[in-house]
Amino acid sequence: LNVDASSSSGSPIPDTFFGIFFEEINHAGAGGLWAELVSNKGFEAGGPNTPSNIDPWAIIGSASHINVETDRTSLFDRNKIALRLEVLCNTTGDNICPAGGVGVYNPGFWGMNIEQGKKYKVVFFVRSTGSVNLAVSLTGSNGVGSLASAKITGSASDVSNWTKVETILEAKATDHNARLQLTTTTEGVIWLDQVSAMPQDTYKQHGFQTDLYGMLANMKPRFIRFPGGCFVEGERLRNAFRWNKTVGPWEERPGHFGDVWMYWTDDGLGYFEFLQLAEDLGALPIWVFNSGISHQEQVNTTAVLPFVQEALDGIEFARGDATSKWGSLRAAMGHPEPFDLKYVAVGNEDCEKKNYRGNYLKFYSAIRSAYPDIQIISNCDASSQPLDHPADLYDYHVYTNANNLFARATVFDRASRSGPKAFVSEYAVIGTDAGTGSLKAALAEAGFLIGLERNSDVVHMISYAPLFVNTNDRRFVCVFVLRWNPDAIVFNSYQLYGTPSYWVQLFFWESSGATLLKASLQSTLSNSLTASAITWKNPVDGNNYIRIKVVNFDANTVNLHISFDGLDPNTVHLSGSSKTLLTSSSLTDENSLSQPNKVVPIQSLLQSVGREVNVVVPPY
Ligand code: AHR
């Protein structure tokens, strides 16, 4: 491998090159990154009709002690369902309540992770025809063993109208499979609504689960595309993610059923929180909005204007000043400064839909004229032929087997050098090669990424998909319900790990804003060996480094001889160079909750680095 390291030989890699794509899929957000512990906190998930299914809430107590049903008496207009508890037992008289009382419990998303010494903020709304005397407690999964509890009392006059209750519970023991209980031993009728429990310790108190957030921060993403994916489209338009139903106070949000990935979200992780997440990560937000098209429905271009207005309103929410209609709502939510929204994508994977082009052009001209600086992303792939409509970037998605993805490293060699740039916003090896996240998949992806890096004059952004999976959501649900494998970050209520594909991505964060060096590989192994070289400035020490990335996608060892041209011996430090290796004994090796570090990068010092370097690159 010959690397021309002279300053004149390189070409700039875009600052935005490497980022992440967050979709609400596999309980990535609800039951994942969003730290809310209660699932279905407003009892809305069963739909607006009563009686409504309150799953996963369940009743504590028998029918002779308590009668629980939903009604439509909520304080909040956009989520009218509330829970009515008619308590028939008491501490005295004929019908004595069982020890521990009667009421309801919520097991969260497959069990709540409650940790000793940590504090949890429980908030709920209550109303009653009499006084209330409630125990709010965190317990083991079967209701036994109190981890933390508080008594909530209120006289009849206190709670005759809906009243907001807040309490902090400090856990005195750890249970990864805990539940939240609200119980009483006082006869009467109580209504509950919008019951939330959050750990006090979330990233910057912004609601992001700290460990999962940390996995994202490690990737140093320059952008975050959100919130989907198919989640943006919906099977039916009525179930698509619509930004304006996910902002404002959390208790007023209606929530919605994501009918592609088939689960309910309370939308605590809404549009505002996605923008906040981007800002916290130091990443540019890339907002994907619905183009008036779902998997099964298409709005006619003549009728798409309400969707266009919704997109313009969403941009105003992010960028408008605090006196604008939507900017003022953002300010009221605690963020008077605008968010740095510079990229929007019109729909997801909709290019082949009949109405896409017509709809797209309506969005394009309205956004271009109101916000000329916003970069607009089309769903239509222009890697092999020019677009027939204006765009700043075009989406490129690829999910395939390992050999095919490795071979696609050259796909952008042939792309037009003029016109819109490529946003490889979803890529991954899938199928048997990938399992639930294999070394083989990661190697093929690494080869593909090297090809993208070598084409970074036309490829401006890349992100893997999907990002997260809650292992509990990997189970087979029914024949129509798809669960997506593999995913970069795997977690349950208290454990997590990165797949090899996650670790491969960490080899690329340095590339954003770096300089691509000319690097030519002389080898007979062109189908299995690929390499790139960059020079980049480390913000920590201010020094420039050269990083060479090599993928050996073959069963044989490669003895790689690397030579450098153009290095100035007076300014270059040759000692202290290092090698980082990601491999394993078998191509099918994966990480797991029990072996989270089986396939992870290992760093070691490179001995005697000079203008000529010999590096042994082991198989795979
Ligand atoms: O990443 C999973 C899904 O794959 C996305 O929702 C969709 O855009 C693609 O088909």
Image (tube, rainbow, N blue to C red):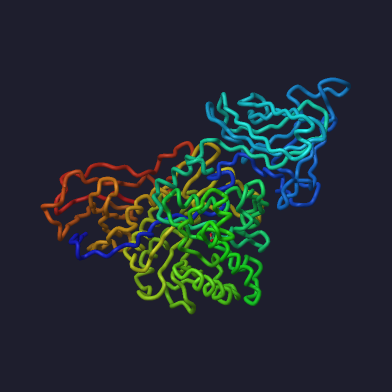
Q: Position of residue 47 (x, y in %)?
A: 74, 51
- In the image, 95 versus 130, the foreground residue is 130
Q: Tag count in the figure?
A: 0
Image side of residue 69 versus residue 195, left or right: right
- Which of the two residues, 461 or 390, is positioned nearer the viewer here? 390
Q: Residue at x 34, y 70 (%)?
A: 413
Image-quadrant location for residue 291: bottom right
The image quarter containing residue 305 is bottom right
Residue for point 54% across, 35% down:
200
Please indicate, yes or no, whether residue 170 appears anywhere in the rendered image: yes
Whole-percent x, y for residue 365 in the image: 52, 75
How far from the left and from the top, in percent, is residue 273? 54, 50
Point out residue 599 in the picture as x, y percentages from the top left corner: 39, 43
- Which residue occupies 65% across, 75% down? 300
30 or 3, nearer to the observer: 30
Residue at the limit of the structure toward the front, as seen here: 323
Q: Quadrant of ligand 1?
A: bottom right
Question: Is residue 94 toward the left or the right of residue 337 in the image?
Answer: right
Residue 429: in sight, yes or no?
Answer: no
Left/right placement of residue 610 relative to residue 85 reads left
